[in-house]
Amino acid sequence: MIDFADIEAAAGRIRGQVVETPCLLSRILSDITGAQVFLKFENLQFTASFKERGALNRLSQLDEAQRLRGVIAVSAGNHAQGVAWHAKRLGIPATIVMPRFTPGVKVMRTREFGAEVVLHGERFDDAREQGLRLAAERGLTMIDPFDDDLIIAGQGTIGIEMLRAQPELDELVVPIGGGGLIGGIATAARHLKPGIRVTGVQTERFALVYDAIKGTRHEVGAGSIAEGIAVNRLGERTLPIIRERVDDVVLVGEGDIEQAILLLLEVEKTVVEGAGAAGLAALLRHPDRFRGRRVGLVLCGGNIDPLLLASIIERGMVRTGRLARLYVDIRDVPGALSHVTGILAEEQANIEQIRHERAFGSVGSQRVEVEIVVQTRGPEHVQALLARLAEAGFAARTG
């Protein structure tokens, strides 16, 4: 099991080659959650993920023969880019095995970093098996995404930086996938501030570590918005560290993570992926556990698909009442719809979509139900719109 000396050594090896990201107080998120919230912006690394730290520490310890033969990693995301980027910098040939479903932008970016990309299998397990075969056939060194002492130590450098920047922290809240990140951070934190509390966060769809610690059982999901922590195997090296050095593990839902992504975008003007928002999601889901404490959150990555982010923004607007769908019953005569849209304009509601329902409607042949999607200022504004339409004689509802 690694100790603090391993993390100190890793910090020396990677210093100047990765970004020492800021760890800053968020006043607005503190007001929202009731905790004093400090954010560690690992999404500002060159590859937009903390994974660079462990990858660089592992690569720097290869012997000359291993460097010449090259390395291999199995990843559909951040670990792939971290290994590819630093292997290129160090002049080490890198092969990355990815499942065939991996988004094209991630494949392209990994290739741009100079790695050979092998697409294999429909599932991550299929890609991993192919990676192990290629490693044996070509004599390549496998760079595991989390279950390796040098990887864990590299990730632990985040803990040193957080407590150096904010020594008064009471608690660290850290996402858990395979456990390399929290294992390293917890090791550093226990040495530097023995009384600090360390809490891990997993998504309900991938709760393997939670189940191992709590003795519960959750079905493994088909996928998660937090793909960076959607890991379906336990770490032989990481799990014992978590058992010994992590105080608790909590679960969050997909909706919690979506809400956290949107809050970080709106409040901090920073883009995070699902895994990067898991810590804030925990504060939103379990506010009583953290209220009044000085809490450090790790925004561990920012690689989110733009279309997914757009969907999250739109869903978040619906959830907060800033995007509403109105159904208005009107007479099917000229000018009726114009009257409705005029009222909405007077009330400063911007129309996004509008749809008539005639043939399949249920309000009669001389009437029509119009579906109108409007941008609003929130739930109170929506109620004001309904009241104003009612005053004008229109039956209106949301849906």
Image (cartoon, rainbow, N blue to C red):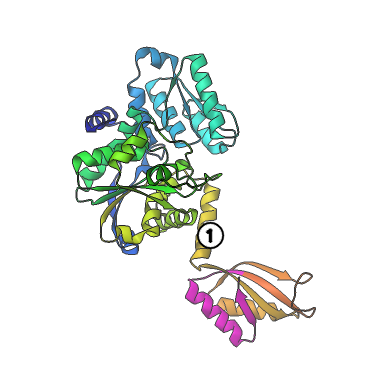
Identify which amino acid the numbered label 1 is placed on.
Arg
Residue 237 in the figure: left or right of residue 109: left
| Residue drawn at 36 percent across, 13 percent down | 64
Q: Position of residue 50 (x, y in %)?
A: 37, 38
Residue corresponding to mark 1: 315
Check the image and report above or below for 291 versus 326.
above
Q: Residue furthest front?
A: 215
Front residue of this view, candidates 391 and 225: 225
Estimate how packed mark 1 is, as few (under 14), some (14 to 19) or many (20 or more) residues with alpha carbons within 10 Å: some
- Residue 347 shows up from this direction: no
Q: Position of residue 337 (x, y in %)?
A: 68, 77
**Where does the magenta region start and end?**
373-399
Rendering quarter of residue 42: top left
- Residue 64 shows up from this direction: yes
Residue 11 in the figure: left or right of residue 332: left
Q: Position of residue 90 (x, y in %)?
A: 37, 22
Check the image and report above or below for 92 versus 7.
above
- Give the position of the N terminus as an image quadrant: top left
